[in-house]
Amino acid sequence: MGILDAIKGQLIDVIEWSDNSGKTMVHKYDMNGKEIMMGAQLTVRESQVAIFVNEGELADVFEPGRYELKTSNMPILTALKSWKYGFNSPFKSDVYFVNTKQFLDMKWGTSNPVMMRDAEFGMIRVRAFGIYSFRVSDAAKFLKEVFGTAALFTVEGVEGQIKRTLVSGLSDAIAESKIPALDLAANYEELSAYAMQAINPKLAELGLTLCSFVIENISLPEEVEKSIDKRTSMGVLGNMDQYAKYQAAEAMRDAANNQNGVAGMGVGMGAGAAMGQMFAQSMNPAAPQAAAAPAAATAVCAACGAKIAADSKFCPECGTKQAAGSFCTSCGKEIPAGTKFCPECGAKQ
């Protein structure tokens, strides 16, 4: 019994792995110098894939489930080791567990500004940041292209590569969409979807897939934001002419309140009248201007035809005496002598 126990102690009859870190992508099962017993139990949990590697060469891949290892369910390893049917001896093989769950809340951001051409602002630089999630979609390809034969592989090993691919894809999406800078915030979802279509084919070459890509913010340069703030302020103020007049009135008031120096006294003396006139114009811009004084009525000299005042008794040009009451004293129209009211304007004569 002692010899049998010693032999059994050198064999592995149960193979399984549990991830307690949440960040491990690949875990190499520790054989500790032991061999795998033919008929051993292999447990592959959900969101896992088990890969057998024989002397550095990819062999059989096991999806989630419980397996009894034997030649019938290890066809590739059986062929590599040239086992005959019914082979029952212990064997050596490297076993890798690949985590295929989604790795969530991964952060990305532009380390350098992204240049873009905007129709309104011209050439500008934008920065962006957000989160993404990804998973291993092809465990065998991921083993070949990324982690090789490392004993442990975490998300940090691919995080930098994915981030750079994300930023490149987003830059292309912004440039090709030709969305104005002021409208970028309203198109985050469209840009995310467009970027995912461009990024996933590149990640598929590594056996990875991008599950979600979220843009949290796209920020403009400080000088552009200041310009936008100024435009916003102008829009809120409305009528700039009215605002300018108000500002001028405020300046006059401040000057009038300044009692230091002769200049302040002079400004104060005229500020009241100027402010009153300015406020009257600014508060009622549609008010009609004061009506001009009516022009004096004119008449025509009966002798020389020169224009004379309607109430003139003699023509200042030729000296001819004018017939009394021959012209309206108000509108200058010729009226019959002795008329008490002008038939044209109704003025009393």
Image: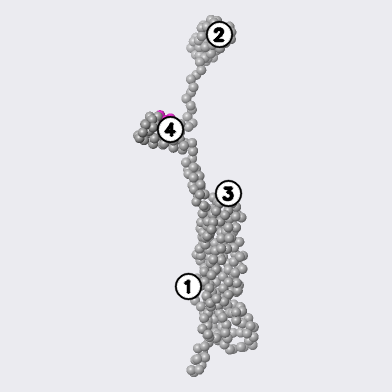
Give the crowd class for mark 4: few <14, some 14-19, many >=20 residues within 10 Å: some
- Which numbered tag is attached to residue 122? 3
Residue 39 as seen in the image, left or right of residue 287: right
Is 273 magenta? The answer is yes
Kindly report which numbered mark, 4 or 3, lies closer to the viewer in this rendering. 3
In the figure, residue 170 lies in which quadrant? bottom right
| Residue that carries the numbered disc 2 in the rendered image | 317
Q: What residue type is disc 1 on?
A: Ser
Residue 326 lies, in percent from the top left, at 54, 8
Q: For the residues marked 4 and 3, what is the alpha-carbon distance in whole angstroms?
A: 41 Å
- Which numbered tag is attached to residue 21? 1
Q: For the residues marked 3 and 1, what is the alpha-carbon distance in whole angstroms?
A: 48 Å
Highlighted magenta segment, given as a residue range: 271-279
Q: For residue 197, say whether it is visible.
A: no
Kindly report which numbered mark, 2 or 4, lies closer to the viewer in this rendering. 2
In the figure, residue 38 lies in which quadrant? bottom right
Ranked by sequence position, the earlier of labels 4 and 3 is 3
Ranked by sequence position, the earlier of labels 2 and 4 is 4
Residue 248 lies, in percent from the top left, at 44, 35
Q: Which residue appears at 53% of the width and 79% of the height?
A: 29
| Residue that carries the numbered disc 4 in the rendered image | 279
Q: Which residue appears at 58% of the width and 49% of the height?
A: 122
Kindly report which numbered mark, 3 or 1, lies closer to the viewer in this rendering. 3
Determine whether label 4 and label 3 are within 8 Å by CB: no
